[in-house]
Amino acid sequence: MQKASEQQWLVTGANGNLGRRFVVATLSSTQDRIRAVVRSARAAKQLTAIELTAEQRGRLDVRVLDYTDQEALLGAAQGCSRALHLVGILKATKSAPYAQAHEASAEVMAKVCDHSSIEHLTYLSILGSTASSPNACLASKGRAEDILLSAATLVCVLRVPMVLGEGDYASRALLARGAQARSLAFRPQSLEQPIYAGDVIQAVTQAALLKHAGALDLAGAESLSRKDLLQRVAACMGKTTVVMGLPIALGYALASCMQALLANPPLTSAMLGVLDHDDAIDPAPALQALQMQALCSVDTTINKLLAANLDA
Ligand SMILES: NC(=O)c1ccc[n+]([C@@H]2O[C@H](COP(=O)([O-])OP(=O)(O)OC[C@H]3O[C@@H](n4cnc5c(N)ncnc54)[C@H](OP(=O)(O)O)[C@@H]3O)[C@@H](O)[C@H]2O)c1
């Protein structure tokens, strides 16, 4: 029988980078159970491929459903006390607009929380998100935040910038660029404040434990320019790299052309705007609210990524 301190989580978008990381961290460090919700058999396979012990696997229940199917999501939420909503996109396409991924899924999630045993929900959003943002992605995330924060259930919105975790796509790309003798970057003085994925998972756990309600901006320990970040990566590898700047206007022109010509462009204006957002906040208030100690430094984070690359 489940002990009082053991929790049952409902996690949507559970097959993504942070979802898989949350699943591993939670099943290995607690006796909690996870109902992991995904939207396809392919996504479910990503979860079954995670290395877990038989006992841990027994505490993972994977469900495939449409995030806008309220009845199905309500069924999956039965018996859960905590929820984590990880559904989100950086790049919208004609067939997958921001409103569908963010606002529509948030509407359903808010209703499901209010009509189920869920006592607390955490939503991962993007630093800079607000409904009034001129950027389509940040505005959509901001509207999804507002929808969730208006639920009767206690909701914590965690706005984070670039997340770096062992083996994820963004981290591999960053390491690859840092390893080059020369690289090009749009607006290299743009400010980054990357946060270690393990710190994000800890923040989610603390938010649920403390039943924190409200929005928190949480970013890494240091804000530095994109150029400095690439040079820090190179230095951690014992190398040097020269970063040459490209005007951001060129990036937007390129993105506009791709959007006009391609159904699924590799770059969009909204995506570029999020990546180009200047991230420079004081993480202390969020750390205090979540009763967390200091975050991983940039160098510690890079060294963790490098160590994982060597192991792979
Ligand atoms: N990673 C970061 O650097 C970062 C930074 C700030 C905020 N966040 C936020 O944190 C959350 C999780 O991030 P992550 O890195 O784990 O993302 P991820 O790996 O891209 O996973 C995103 C999840 O959303 C689902 N999804 C994508 N498009 C969808 C759509 N149109 N409709 C419904 N579901 C859709 C994906 O399902 P499929 O696999 O089936 O497509 C996947 O389960 C996201 O909401 C993101 O905005 C992440």
Image (tube, rainbow, N blue to C red):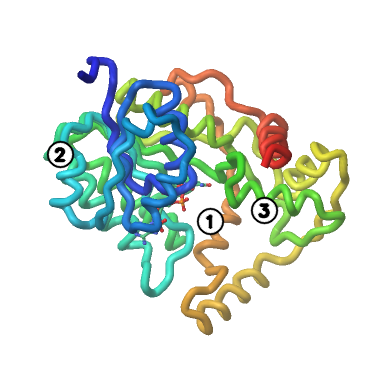
Mark 1 or 3, closer to the camera:
3
Find numbered disc 2 in the image and state the secondary structure of the residue it sits on. Answer: helix
From the viewer's side, name the closer residue of 184 and 191. Answer: 184
Mark 1 or mark 2, which is nearer the start of the sequence? 2
Quadrant where the N terminus sits is top left
Residue at 15 percent across and 44 percent down: it is: 75
Q: How many marks?
A: 3
Query: Residue 198, image x and y in percent?
Result: 53, 31
Of tags 2 and 1, which is closer to the observer?
2
Are the residues flagged by discs 2 and 3 in contact, CB closer than 8 Å?
no
Which residue is situated farthest in the bottom direction here? 261
Separation (CA) of disc 2 from disc 1 = 31 Å
Label 3 neighbourhood size at 10 Å, few (<14), some (14-19), many (20+)?
Answer: few
Q: Which residue is labeled 2 in the image? A: 114
Q: Amino acid at mark 2?
A: Asp
Q: Which residue is mark 3?
A: 173
244 sits left or right of 201 in the view? right
- Mark closer to the chain start, 1 or 3: 3
Name the amino acid type tagged 3. Answer: Ala
User: Does residue 280 appear left or right of residue 131 in this picture?
Assistant: right
Seen in the picture, residue 66 relative to 50 is either above or below; the reply is below
Observer-side mark, 2 or 3, equals 3
Q: Position of residue 33 (x, y in %)?
A: 30, 29
Q: Quadrant of residue 26?
A: top left
Mark 1 neighbour class, 10 Å CA radius: few under 14, some 14 to 19, many 20 or more: many
Q: Secondary structure at mark 3?
A: helix
Q: CA distance from mark 2 to mark 3?
A: 40 Å
Res 168 label? none
User: Does residue 256 lie above or below 148 as drawn?
Assistant: below
